[in-house]
Amino acid sequence: MFQIEIGESGTVVAEGRLDAAQAPRAQEFLDEIQGECVLDLGKVDYISSAGLGVLLRTHKRLMGSGQGLKLVNVRSHINDIFMYSGFDKLFEIEIAE
């Protein structure tokens, strides 16, 4: 199961598995975001290459307007995926405590 919504503080909150089956829904949601976007991944259990693609496309689109995608509450096993893929060099990432 995957959920994505705007949280109380205006942060985008994702939960569950961001895999190929959920990537289109996540992309559709994130395509509506304008300006800087903070994405809370604290409740994301898994992210596939399709999910990474969603984040990359969103980041590139936002960078076109001088903004970007910031990832917060990133759990260590998700951060490992970002490190192995080199995405840790593309995104501003805050690791979960």
Image (cartoon, rainbow, N blue to C red):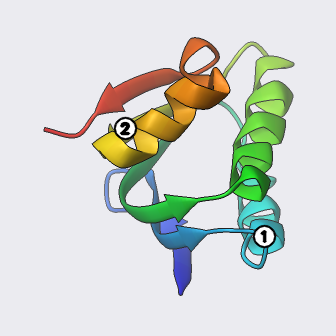
The answer to whether 42 appears left or right of 2 in the picture is left
Residue at the image position 78 percent from the left and 56 percent from the top: 50
Question: Does 4 sit above or below residue 97?
Answer: below
The answer to whether 97 appears left or right of 89 in the picture is left
**Mark 1 or mark 2: which comes first in sequence?**
1
User: Circle 1 is placed at which residue position?
Assistant: 20
Q: In terms of image quadrants, where is residue 55?
A: top right
Amino acid carrying mark 1 in the image: Ala
Give the image location of residue 79, x and y in percent: 42, 36
Give the image location of residue 88, x and y in percent: 54, 20
User: Circle 2 is placed at which residue position?
Assistant: 72
Amino acid carrying mark 2 in the image: Val
The outermost residue toward the left is 97
The answer to whether 46 appears left or right of 97 in the picture is right
In the image, 91 versus 13, the foreground residue is 91
Residue at the image position 76 percent from the left and 35 percent from the top: 56
Residue 74 visible in the picture = no
Question: Does 50 sit above or below residue 5?
Answer: above
User: Mark 2 packing: few (<14 Cα in 10 Å), some, or many (20+)?
Assistant: some
Which numbered dot is residue 33? none
The outermost residue toward the bottom is 1
User: Mark 1 packing: few (<14 Cα in 10 Å), some, or many (20+)?
Assistant: some
Residue 42 visible in the picture = yes
Residue at the image position 65 percent from the left and 29 percent from the top: 85
Q: Mark 1 against mark 2, which lies toward the viewer?
A: 1
In the image, 18 versus 69, the foreground residue is 18
The answer to whether 57 appears left or right of 90 in the picture is right
Residue at the image position 50 percent from the left and 63 percent from the top: 46
Give the image location of residue 72, x and y in percent: 37, 38
In the image, 35 versus 45, the foreground residue is 45
Asked which secondary structure carries label 1, the reply is: loop
Give the image location of residue 24, x and y in percent: 84, 70
